[in-house]
Image (cartoon, rainbow, N blue to C red):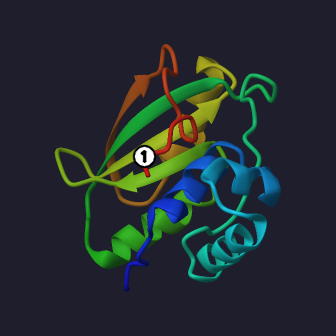
Amino acid sequence: MNRVKLDTFDHAILRNLAVNGRMSVTELADRIGLTKSPTQARLKRLEEQGVIIGYRAQIDPHQIDAAHIAFVEIKLSDTREAALRAFNDAVRKVPEIEECHLIAGAFDYLLKVRSSDIASYRRVLAEHISGLPHITSTSTHVVMEAVKETGEAPLF
């Protein structure tokens, strides 16, 4: 996979849209210091090249009763490709699992799980996570406060 070469204007477009994906092209152009037409052309190119893969709404988890966050370390009994595929496919079917990352380290996966409270998390753990394929152990870390989450300050 070839990485796309980005210049300072491209990075400025990405930074601005990461904070406000509904920004008009005119406002975006003003913010990055170009006129509307070249900004629109750059935006289209970034979308066509797969740099920008979509737009979505940021939802307040408190408003939808999903403010409780737990991170779960997962150790598997089998880490061959077929076992990893089975685990990955099963994880994608659990709506409370917001993120799942394969980790190089003391455990195999790290899950970010959202629920309404500790009791509902406990049910998700017992009824869904513990039954995922090839799990030998889990370790839960409950979040006391989300200090910084995705979309607040992009790196690029």
When the figure is inspected, residue 22 is found, relative to residue 89, above or below; the finding is above
Task: Quadrant for the N terminus, please.
Answer: bottom left
Q: Residue at x 66, y 24 (%)?
A: 67
Q: Residue furthest bottom?
A: 1
Residue 94 visible somewhere in the drawing: no
When the figure is inspected, residue 59 is found, relative to residue 122, above or below; the finding is below
Q: Is residue 29 left or right of residue 87?
A: right
* Along the line of sight, the residue nearer the viewer: 45 or 86: 45
x and y percent of residue 27 in the render? 78, 50
When the figure is inspected, residue 18 is found, relative to residue 112, above or below; the finding is below
Q: Is residue 91 left or right of residue 55?
A: left
Residue 138 visible somewhere in the drawing: yes
Count of labels in the image: 1
Q: Is residue 112 left or right of residue 109?
A: right
Residue type at numbered disc 1? Leu
x and y percent of residue 28 in the render? 72, 53
The image quarter in which residue 5 lies: bottom left
* Along the line of sight, the residue nearer the viewer: 140 or 126: 140
Residue that badge 1 annotates? 155
Q: Residue furthest left?
A: 106
